[in-house]
Image: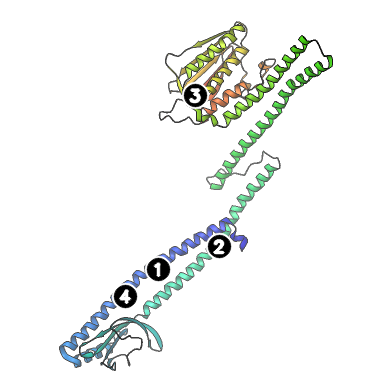
């Protein structure tokens, strides 16, 4: 029994039963109170009228008239519930259907509700005690035992209803508990399998509007996202280990060669410089990962403000102009006619545009042209487009290049660790936008799309 009470479904069913019982008590209690009050008023009105009639007869015709009235009313068969007693100042019975003055009646006039023995049974009786002229005493009342019987019937029915409600609540709780436990057990089995390493396990669904089915679908979506994140972390960890192993191995070999050969000072300084370059590559990987973690956490949302996107793009173009020129390429910036503003973090937006331009310059052939332009669409969104004349990206790789540490065929032999476009995609997601790729025929068109600033100044929701 204690184990059943620990079940949420059983406690819920018993709680509903308690609410039903309490509401039944309140409803029946209010109904009985209104009914009893109505009956009391009717009975009291009849009693007062009878007492007034006896008093009037005593005043008009004296004791003989009052006695006759009491005898006639007590003998009447039409009202078997009527109680009458006319007594002298010494409380000796003079007329009526009571043989003696009831001991329950106090010394002062007023209303009394007592029990009188009638037909061998004790009946509830409501009586008014009135003092008449000449010291005479009058009792007029009505047998209200029927009201007591009605009350007992109502209470008995309510007791049965309470018992049935409790039984139904327990039975309903057991049925609910069995249904809930079946769903909970399915969740327990699935989560236990996931804990053991089977990340592909999912809860069974039936494509219905049932609340548990909707919960299962939500949990399955969460599990799918967790699986993606875990696999992403696993792949990223493997890639980080692979990418860091090369520069660290080269660094170790350089230092080991220095210790073994002990070359002249100029050659030693050259090797030290190469070692510093290897360390810079390692630090660059960690800096990029920290930047991605900072972006993914959403902490940079607090730094959002209105940003002139065209001004940020102009600064990036000015910064990378000499880089493109040194490679024999041409970087052109097409300034928009009007200012283009967005809500965002200027540093992150500058980083994203820089990464797109850096990729375009890196993969453009000598003599090629890179075009950076900013525009505002008809719906108010902002677009940053970078076009190059390089080898482009195959359609099969367009969804893969934003994956961390991904290096496509075109990136083989190029500097970098494969995090540039991952940063751009993360910045776009943080700003509620997206990164798209299209063929330039030849080359690639990379477009960073950012939503229009809200009229209320609210920050854009991350995609």
Q: Quadrant of residue 428?
A: top right
Name the residue nearer the viewer: 278 or 243.
278
Q: Are marks 4 and 1 in contact (CB under 8 Å)?
A: no
Classify residue 4 as left or right of residue 56: right
Q: Real-space Cα distance between discs 2 and 3?
A: 58 Å
Q: Real-space Cα distance between discs 2 and 4?
A: 40 Å
Residue wearing tag 1: 29
Q: Earlier in the sequence, mark 2 or mark 3?
A: 2
Note whether residue 405 is visible. Answer: no
Q: Earlier in the sequence, mark 4 or mark 3?
A: 4
Residue wearing tag 4: 40
Q: Nearer the viewer, mark 2 or mark 4?
A: 4
Q: Residue at x 45, y 69 (%)?
A: 158
Which disc number belongs to residue 450?
Answer: 3
Residue wearing tag 2: 170
Q: Earlier in the sequence, mark 4 or mark 1?
A: 1
Q: Real-space Cα distance between discs 2 and 1?
A: 25 Å
- Tell me the element at label 4: helix
Q: Are marks 2 and 1 in contact (CB under 8 Å)?
A: no
Q: Check the image and name the residue furthest to the left.
A: 60
Q: Residue at x 78, y 21 (%)?
A: 252
- Tell me the element at label 1: helix
For mark 1, does the 10 Å Cα neighbourhood hold few (<14), some (14 to 19), or many (20 or more) residues? some
């Amino acid at each position: 029994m204690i184990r059943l009470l620990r079940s949420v479904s059983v406690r819920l069913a018993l709680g509903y039963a308690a609410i039903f019982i309490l509401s039944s008590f309140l409803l029946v209690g209010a109904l009985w109170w209104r009914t009893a009050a109505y009956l009391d008023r009717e009975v009291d009105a009849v009693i007062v009228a009878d007492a007034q009639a006896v008093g009037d007869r005593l005043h008009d015709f004296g004791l003989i008239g009052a006695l006759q009235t009491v005898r006639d009313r007590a003998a009447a068969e039409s009202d078997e519930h009527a109680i009458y007693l006319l007594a002298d100042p010494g409380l000796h019975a003079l007329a009526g259907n009571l043989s003696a003055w009831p001991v329950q009646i106090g010394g002062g006039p007023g209303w009394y509700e007592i029990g009188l023995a009638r037909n061998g049974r004790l009946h509830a009786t409501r009586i008014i005690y009135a003092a008449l002229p000449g010291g005479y005493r009058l009792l007029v009342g009505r047998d209200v035992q029927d009201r007591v019987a009605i009350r007992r019937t109502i209470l008995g029915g309510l007791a049965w209803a309470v018992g049935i409600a409790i039984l139904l609540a327990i039975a309903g709780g057991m049925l609910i508990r069995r249904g809930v436990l079946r769903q909970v057990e399915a969740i327990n089995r699935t989560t236990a399998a996931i804990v053991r390493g089977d990340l592909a396990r999912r809860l069974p669904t039936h494509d219905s509007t049932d609340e548990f089915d909707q919960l299962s679908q939500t949990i399955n979506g969460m599990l799918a996202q967790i699986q993606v994140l875990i696999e992403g972390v696993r792949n990223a960890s493997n890639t980080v280990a692979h990418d860091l192993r090369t520069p660290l191995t080269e660094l170790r070999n350089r230092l080991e060669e220095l210790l073994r050969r002990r070359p002249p000072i100029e050659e030693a300084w050259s090797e030290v410089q190469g070692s510093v370059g290897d360390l810079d590559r390692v630090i660059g990987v960690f800096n990029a990962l920290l930047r991605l973690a900072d972006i993914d956490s959403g902490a940079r949302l607090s730094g959002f403000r209105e940003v002139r996107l065209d001004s940020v793009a102009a600064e990036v173009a000015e910064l990378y102009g000499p880089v493109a020129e040194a490679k024999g390429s041409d970087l052109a910036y097409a300034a928009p006619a009007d200012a283009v503003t967005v809500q965002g973090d200027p540093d992150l937006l500058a980083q994203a545009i820089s990464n797109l331009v850096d990729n375009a310059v890196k993969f453009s052939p000598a003599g090629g042209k890179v075009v950076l332009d900013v525009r505002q669409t008809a719906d108010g969104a902002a677009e940053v487009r970078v076009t190059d004349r390089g080898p482009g990206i195959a359609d099969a790789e367009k969804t893969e290049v934003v994956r961390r540490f991904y290096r496509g065929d075109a990136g083989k032999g190029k500097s970098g660790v494969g995090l540039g476009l991952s940063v751009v995609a993360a910045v776009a997601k943080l700003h509620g936008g997206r990164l798209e790729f299209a063929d330039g025929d030849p080359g690639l068109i990379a477009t960073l799309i950012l939503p229009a600033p809200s009229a209320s100044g609210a920050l854009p929701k991350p995609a």
